[in-house]
Image (cartoon, rainbow, N blue to C red):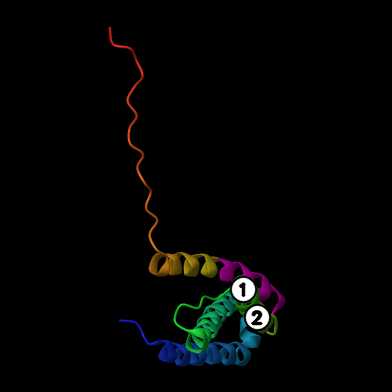
Amino acid sequence: MGLSTFSSFIVSTTLALIIFSSMQIFKVQLGSSEWFTIGGGALGSMLFCCLLTAVSNVEMILFGDMFQAKLVPEVFGCLVTACFASGLVHRVCVTTCFIFSMIDLYYLNKLSAKKYQAPVTLAMKPKSKSKQKKH
């Protein structure tokens, strides 16, 4: 069973703060090699996911359970924030954070569509009888 909206907000905000502070504490190590900069971008994409969850949960608390996060203010703002936090670590982390965040966003959208969108039903057309003449 999932968490309530408020509990999910608290957990995702706490995780976002832990990830951001870990990125700042280990910024020297994360910028020391190629693989660690890719790992820094992966941490940035986790930060993006947690920030987006927190922002969406706040909006659901304030505006109702059916409120959805939009692309321009919420998703773009969380993406810019995560890329900025990754940029404080290393320049390459920004690029990898963006790439990993786009992958995260694809799967978050797919998961959200599976849970919240109404299934589409296609109406079947009745088969038309052939218009051939019978001899």
Pick the front one: 30 or 110: 110
Read off the residue under disc 2.
86
Pick the front one: 5 or 18: 5
Read off the residue under disc 1.
97
Horizontal relation, residue 84 to residue 26: left or right: right
Q: Which residues make up the magenta segment?
A: 89-102
Residue 60: x and y in percent read 49, 84
Q: Residue at x 61, y 71 (%)?
A: 71
Q: Disc 2, disc 1: CB below 8 Å?
A: yes
Q: Amino acid at mark 2?
A: Ser
- Determine the secondary structure under disc 1: helix
Q: Amino acid at mark 1?
A: Cys
The residue positioned farthest toward the right in the image shown: 91
Horizontal relation, residue 132 to residue 8: left or right: left
Q: Residues within 10 Å of mark 1 (few under 14, many from 20)?
A: many
Q: Place residue 42 in its image quadrant.
A: bottom right
Horizontal relation, residue 28 to residue 127: left or right: right
117 up-or-down from 27: above or below: above
Question: Per the image, is 35 magenta?
Answer: no
Pick the front one: 61 or 80: 61
* Quadrant the N terminus occupies: bottom left
92 up-or-down from 23: above or below: above
The residue positioned farthest toward the top in the image shown: 135
Whichever of callouts 2 and 1 sits on the residue coming sooner in the sequence is 2
Question: Per the image, is 97 magenta?
Answer: yes
Residue 17: x and y in percent read 55, 92
